[in-house]
């Protein structure tokens, strides 16, 4: 039987990465084989593109095309083969991030996004997307507390991140059965209880 594809999404600092490995371990505890991966990245080529995408400024359409180029490779080399073997795949960001960041944040034409999405993964959407949503100010505080070096996206102004958040919320509203919104300002413990319930619904 084909495996399930779960993606994590949210604005920078929402806290999604804090749950990725935990969810993988929880599913492994139920006897499932789980691949954990991320975008941009997930393959040797994708990780090289990630380095460029997170650090170099470039034209919006170049940025979008590189996100989808990395995704094409990722699907071919890792995601599709794992799902076909019956493994579950947990991916830290996928195409909803392009919708939110390049579309909402930077104003990419929706038709161009939809054309690329159709080209690169016409027959595949995540079975479940966990959208970590929280006020921008809380996410910012977490990033400051973590004291990490900020990448190109994290250095964007607040209005960019507000648009990204809104684009995610709009997309969730348009696909309520696939995209489940998680109140990310809650404690890690409370979020994990909610994730267990949501993920059980696709087991
Ligand atoms: N529910 C929470 N309550 C308080 N702090 C949290 C919570 N979840 C995560 N954090 C902290 O917030 C910081 C950002 O978390 P994390 O790296 O998981 O976010 P992220 O969404 O993956 O961010 P990015 O996409 O920017 O990498 C970390 O220092 C983490 O420990
Ligand atoms: C897949 C994807 C990602 N991004 C942005 C979103 C984040 O700011 C970075 C990735 O960093 P993270 O710490 O691994 O979350 O890349 C994007 O703009 N568009 C995309 O398609």
Image: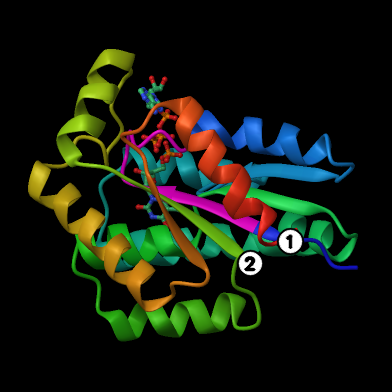
Real-space Cα separation, disc 2 to disc 1, in angstroms: 6 Å
Q: Nearer the viewer, residue 85 or 77?
A: 85
Q: Residue at x 42, y 63 (%)?
A: 96
Q: Position of residue 43 (x, y in %)?
A: 67, 46
Tell me if 90 is positioned left or right of 35 in this view: left
Left or right position of 189 against 74: left
Residue 171 x %, y %:
35, 70
Q: Is residue 42 magenta?
A: no
- Residue nearest the observer in this picture, 96 or 62: 96
Ligand 1 appears in which quadrant?
A: top left
Instruction: Let me know if residue 118 appears in the view.
Output: yes
The x, y position of residue 131, in whole percent, is 42, 53
Q: Residue at x 33, y 15 (%)?
A: 146
Q: Quadrant of the C terminus?
A: bottom right
Residue under the point 83% across and 54% down:
87
- x and y, in percent, of residue 10 in the image: 37, 48
Q: Which of 191/12 is in front?
A: 191
What crowding class fits label 1: few (fewer than 14 Cα within 10 Å), some (14-19), or many (20 or more)?
some
Residue beneath label 2, please? Answer: 127
Vertical position of residue 5 compared to residue 33: above or below: below
Residue drawn 73% across the image and 64% down it: 76
Dot 2 or dot 1: first in sequence order is 1
- Name the element at disc 2: loop
Count of numbered circles on the image: 2
Looking at the image, residue 115 sits to the left or right of residue 153; the answer is right
Vertical arrangement, residue 184 with respect to residue 91, above or below: above
Report if the CB atoms under discs 2 and 1 are less than 8 Å apart.
yes
Give the extent of the magenta segment.
6-16
**In this view, 189 is above or below 169:** above
Q: In the figure, is residue 31 to the left or right of 146?
A: right
* Residue marked by disc 1: 4
């Amino acid at each position: 039987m084909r495996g399930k594809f779960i993606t994590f999404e949210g604005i920078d600092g929402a806290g999604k990465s804090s749950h990725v490995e935990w969810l993988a371990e929880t599913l492994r505890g139920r006897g499932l084989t789980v691949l954990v991966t991320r975008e941009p990245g997930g393959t040797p080529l994708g990780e090289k593109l990630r380095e460029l995408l997170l650090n170099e400024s470039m034209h919006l359409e170049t940025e979008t095309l590189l996100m989808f180029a990395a995704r094409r490779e990722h699907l071919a080399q890792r995601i599709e083969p794992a799902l076909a073997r019956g493994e579950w795949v947990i991916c830290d960001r996928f195409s909803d991030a392009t919708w939110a960041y390049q579309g909402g944040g930077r104003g990419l034409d929706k038709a161009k996004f939809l054309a690329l999405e159709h080209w690169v993964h016409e027959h595949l959407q995540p079975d479940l997307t966990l959208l970590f949503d929280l006020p921008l100010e809380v996410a910012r505080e977490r990033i400051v507390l973590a004291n990490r070096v900020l990448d190109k996206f994290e250095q964007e102004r607040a209005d960019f991140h507000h648009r990204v958040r809104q684009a995610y919320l709009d997309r969730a509203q348009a696909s309520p059965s696939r995209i489940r919104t998680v109140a990310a300002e809650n404690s890690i413990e409370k979020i994990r209880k909610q994730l267990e319930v949501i993920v059980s619904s696709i087991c």
